[in-house]
Image (tube, rainbow, N blue to C red):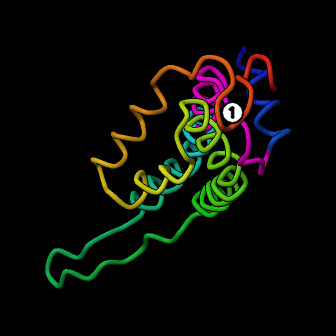
Amino acid sequence: MGFGQAIKHVFSNYANFKGRASRSEFWWWYLFVVIGGIIISIPLNAGITSSLNSVTVDDVTGTITGGQVSTLTQLGIILAAVWTVALLLPTLAVGCRRLHDTNRSGWWWLLYYFCCIVGAIVVIIFWIGPSTPGPNRYGDGPATGS
């Protein structure tokens, strides 16, 4: 599965937590989310930098003046919030389906969020692992059942 096909497939299964997702589908989606996040962070970081450059500190009193939140910063915050909210559900769904493809319950996702670094590492290792060949308790393989 290629990049565009994976993105299209995840969006067409926006909130589908049933079935299986191949490694390529999951990792292409993950790359899409990361690249989009980097692109969205550009106006946010530029706005924060310009806001910080306008800050002045009085050496005698320590009074801070300036530092207004720029329009660019506000735009970046809004874009980041919309990006995060819009992609939260499909990201959870494709992660769950990827776990299903390794014949594990989607509930393993909870380790990623609630068990700090160790839990995240365990879940990432599961995502990296090979698919279960043929059908498993979550359905046919992604190549034949999707």
In the visual, does 51 lie left or right of 142?
left
Q: Where, quadrant-wise, is the C terminus in this rendering?
A: top right
| Residue 16 located within the stretch drawn in magenta | yes
Image position, residue 58 (x, y; %): 23, 76
Residue at the (51%, 48%) spot, across then down: 46
- Figure quadrant of residue 102: top right
Q: Which residues are magenta?
A: 14-33
- Figure quadrant of residue 40: top right
Tell me which amino acid carries mark 1.
Arg
- Figure quadrant of residue 56: bottom left
Image position, residue 113 (x, y; %): 43, 57
Image position, residue 7 (x, y; %): 75, 30
In the image as oriented, which residue stretches furthest toward the left?
A: 60
Q: Where, quadrant-wise, is the N terminus in this rendering?
A: top right
Residue at the (57%, 59%) spot, across then down: 73
**Of residues 53 and 120, the one drawn nearer to the viewer in this rendering:** 120
| Residue 32 located within the stretch drawn in magenta | yes
Total labels drawn: 1
Image position, residue 125 (x, y; %): 39, 31
Residue at the (39%, 57%) spot, across then down: 53
The residue at which mark 1 appears reads as 20
In the visual, does 14 lie left or right of 20?
right
**Of residues 105 and 12, the one drawn nearer to the viewer in this rendering:** 105
Residue at the (80%, 39%) spot, across then down: 11
Q: Residues within 10 Å of mark 1 (few under 14, many from 20)?
A: many
In the visual, does 105 lie left or right of 18?
left
